[in-house]
Amino acid sequence: MNAKPDNKEILGLLARLAVGGLFIYSGAIKALAPAEEFAYAIESYRVLNAQLSLYAAYVTPWVELWAGLLLAAGVFTRANALFIGAMLVFFELLLGQAWLRGLP
Amino acid sequence: MIDQKKARLAAIGAALVFVATIAVLLARQLNLGPERPAPDFRTFGPADAPVQIHEYTDFACPACRGAAGLIEEMLKVYGPGLRIHFKHYPLLNIHPWSLHAAAYADCAGAQGKFKEYAALLFEGQQHWAEAKEEPKQFAEYAARLGLDLDALRTCANAPETLKTIKLEIAEADMKGVNATPTFFINGKRAVGSGQLLDQARKFDSLLRKASPK
């Protein structure tokens, strides 16, 4: 009845725990700190102004935390993995534009 | 059957999200402790000004240099409506000479030249911030301002001076300060010049009412 999990399943579980854990950690430390601190970091990418950066700083840590948690727990895994992948691409684009513009 | 499974997953997901949210909200300890006034030589503007700004600054931080100019401008524009409490928050892990710079500035303040010494520290920050040994600029600035260098050195190394600064660091830590410049405008937090301007705009009517016609 209880079949032994194959290597692919174990690898999938480990990957989920690693990526989910990273998002939980990243979201939690930001959600625990004042939003203004994270907003200041967002401002440094020079994509959003101070006010919009603050709104983004209120929302983003919670989204990261919840998405990481659901992925690690295996709830709606496929949809969550896609969502987290999209977030990662977006973060990389932000970093990339900062690098291209030579921002400090 | 599939719908039942989905519903169960959704319920588990909602429970996880709820528990995590409550746990993080309970673990948050932001803005503890009162805003203590800074020494007289580090406060600018009338004591009864309707808008009180507590500014946590590191002399080696480039963003703080920019914010210092902005604060100067705000003091000129809003005059009697604004009081600035300048607080030290040297980032000891990345700026090795910030604590010393703060001590020298305070001791220059004891000789009546805090503002001038602070302006020189900001102006020359790229020359002393990364120095390997104690920067010679600290003495240079003192000479430029005609300060008593021996007294300044003795004061800057005195445990009492360093204690004052370390108490301010502890006070800032209690308030969740982690980056410079951080401001508390009538208790509302702002990090960096952009947020400072945004917050100041919210107190615009108070500032204008008190400012000279």
Image: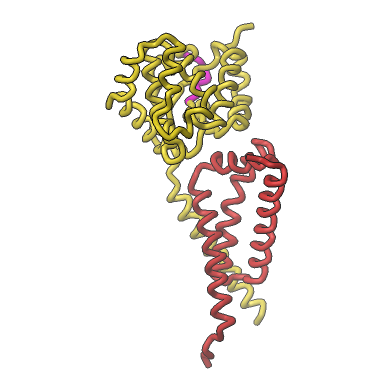
Displayed quadrant of residue B211: top right
Residue drawn at (64%, 45%) of the image: A56
Q: Quadrant of the C terminus of chain B?
A: top right
Q: Against A31, is B157 above or below?
A: above
Q: Against B7, is A22 above or below?
A: above
Residue drawn at (59%, 14%) of the image: B78
Residue B53 falls inside the magenta stretch: yes
Residue drawn at (56%, 21%) of the image: B71
- Magenta residues, start to end: B48-54
Residue B88 falls inside the magenta stretch: no
Displayed quadrant of residue B167: top left
- Farthest residue toward the bottom? A1
Q: Along the line of sight, which residue is nearer the eye, B38 or A100?
A: A100
Q: What colour is chain B?
A: yellow
Where residue A20 appears, as percent x and y from the top left, is 55, 64
Q: Against A17, is A45 above or below?
A: above
Q: Along the line of sight, which residue is nearer the eye, B82 or B180?
A: B180
Q: Against B102, is B48 above or below?
A: above
Residue drawn at (42%, 24%) of the image: B136
Where residue B24 appears, as percent x and y from the top left, is 47, 53
Where residue B75 appears, as percent x and y from the top left, is 56, 15
Where residue B165 appears, as percent x and y from the top left, is 36, 28
Q: Along the line of sight, which residue is nearer the eye, B202 or B123?
A: B123
Q: Quadrant of the N terminus of chain B?
A: bottom right
The chain that appears red in the image is: A
**Residue B161 can be seen, yes or no:** yes
Q: Is residue B36 left or right of residue A71?
A: left
